[in-house]
Amino acid sequence: MTSPPRPTLADVTRGRILYGGDYNPEQWPESVRREDVALMREAGVNLATVGVFSWARLEPRPGERDFGWLDRVLDLLHAGGIGVCLATPTASPPPWMGARHPETLPRDETGAVVWYGSRNHFCASSPVYRDHALRITADLADRYGDHPALRLWHVNNEYGTACWCDVTAAHFRRWLRDRYGSLDALNDAWGTAFWSQRYGDWEEIIPPRRAQYMVNPTQELDFRRFTSDALLECFTAERDALVERTPRIPVTTNFMPLFVGQNGWTWAEREDVVSVDLYPDPADPERDDGAAWGALVQDLTRSQARGPWLLMEQAAGPVNWRGVNHPRPEGLTRLWSLQAVARGADGICFFQWRQSRQGSEKFHSGMVSHAGPRGRTFRQVRQLGADLERLGALTGSPVTARAAVLHDWNAWWATLSAGRPSNLLTYERPLRAWHRALWESHLTCDFAHPESGLEDYALIAVPHLYLLTDAALDNLASYVRGGGTLVCGFFTGVVDTDDRVREGGVDARLREVLGIGTVHEWWPLDEGKVQPLASCGDDIAEGAVGTLWREDFETLPGTETVAAYRGGELGGRPAITRHPFGDGTAWYLSTLPDPAALRALLSRAAGEAGLRPPLPGLPTGVEAVRRGGRLFLLNHRREPATVPLPAPATDELTGRRHEHTITLGRHGAAVLREAPPA
Ligand code: GLA
């Protein structure tokens, strides 16, 4: 028997962009709630996320239930026409759980208890925690499954707690037995012949706890895999309890942006709706932490969702967890929200609705700030609600990207162990630099798993995938052989799935695709040091410098050296190469070029693969993305910008028609419906 199809985000949006935020009415007297609903209506809010951290209120003592207040909240929201995203409260167990069942509390690498008094203090392997979490989840579903306000389930919150306790150790061993089958296989995978680490009994195996010196890197890699899986078991168990009781309500859990602790590809497959929390730093919207960072997270989330997704949390003003917490300049929340819609979001929500007056987050902004409904924040929140109301027709529409950046958590995790050629080479650094270069070149890109089908993409970018499986290597080779363009960054394909170095420094299959021979040595660069490059052939790398990394490698006959190292130990050796392979082309970048050079190289490779920006002549700092037959223009600069238009177009936000150009104000945005060609 086949199970009925699961509901999707479209069942929640029903043709309107979702708009709202976390709503924590239990922090307020009941009298405030009527004003909340009136203000939500005024702002165009249509979704409130309720109950994220309400466990202690819902279950004041073990087994007791206090649902009355939540009944009233849901009824009130429903009467106001506001849908509810109802959370399971399992991210924050009540103090009674830690006090009565200390084994539910996580322990760190040293064995120290991570106490209650904050949040996210649970051991994912603890049967006691899991049992209590499932009971409250089931009771919530039984009580509210038929409530007319219920639109979406929100399980837990930002899963990410790792634990090193004895219960976890036993669970880790079970996971390892499933993975390896035998101790011999584990010893082989972990390379335990090194430093006398051979295990003779499963019971000897522990999580990678604090040790005298560097810990076995494959043990660490497996522990990261295991921790993601253990948390996913918690999510899946709650999801199943919800699906069984409310088959027509979709289920999500909110990701942290580009978060290391969860294998986001695997997790997303288990969700009906993929959602993410995103807090770019407004201090400098033109830096990585602003719009470029937002675009990366949005592209990744859309790719995980394989379609529209939900921005579950952002801030309407300052956060309170950076060293210095800056408010958002006028217009920035609107701009960044429209950026998310442009890149596939069908819902824009905030943490949180009303700014708290007590607790750790009282200086974190809310949609209704301490300044109240007459404050600047709420005025902007109202305006954003009106803008989003006009974009309902976009819901469900895809964003088409013909380029993809490959990303894999296994490769990321494998880079986190100590003892590598350079600590400066983090997984994120090349990833962010490359995505930013594509973003600045106006080339909309997806993210993709290295083993996934790539043939629909004209360009595949691999900033840095240290670990590549055999399947991924074969996949890349057949992609290029079939006519694709691959641009591959350094220190890629170096180890197999067990973190075992591949023969020849870089896997032979990848070297054949790239047209490179022996890789003699890695020559990493110190922070702030650069390596001049010299163009060979044309001037693409003239004046360019490499950063972070260099390699001494041979090229094979037929490989073009696009740029060579100029001066220094590697002077005259190839730095950037290009190689025809099968019907396609493979580029190799053995260093991280400066931003302008990286942009030029990726634009060149993309241009040769037939990719163009959505509009010619876009000014720097103006982002252009097409979605659902609309052209989004987003001005990330503090100055106005004028964009030439190839054809007259109407801005759906203002209803105004623009003939030859459109001028966007500081942080201005337009959503253009282009006139069909005459
Ligand atoms: C996270 C959490 C929220 C809140 C915000 C503050 O995203 O999910 O509960 O703490 O951070 O920025």
Image: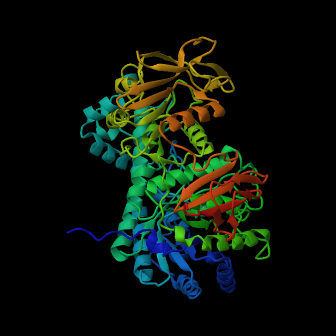
Ligand 1, by image quadrant, is bottom right
- In-image side of 372 versus 441 (left or right): right
Quadrant where the N terminus sits is bottom left
- Taking 131 as reference, is 572 above or below it? above
Quadrant where the C terminus sits is bottom right
Where residue 566 appears, as percent x and y from the top left, is 62, 15
* The one of 667 and 228 positioned closer to us in this rendering: 667
* The one of 344 and 289 positioned closer to us in this rendering: 344
- Taking 620 as reference, is 93 above or below it? below
Q: Residue at x 38, y 57 (%)?
A: 269
**Numbered marks: total:** 0
Where residue 385 appears, as percent x and y from the top left, is 65, 73
Where residue 386 appears, as percent x and y from the top left, is 66, 74
> Which quadrant of the structure image shows residue 70?
bottom right
Report whether residue 161 is seen.
Answer: no
Q: Residue at x 55, y 54 (%)?
A: 298
Q: From this viewpoint, which residue is outermost toward the left?
A: 1
Where residue 642 appears, as percent x and y from the top left, is 74, 53
Report whether residue 544 is seen.
Answer: yes
> Which quadrant of the structure image shows residue 311?
bottom right
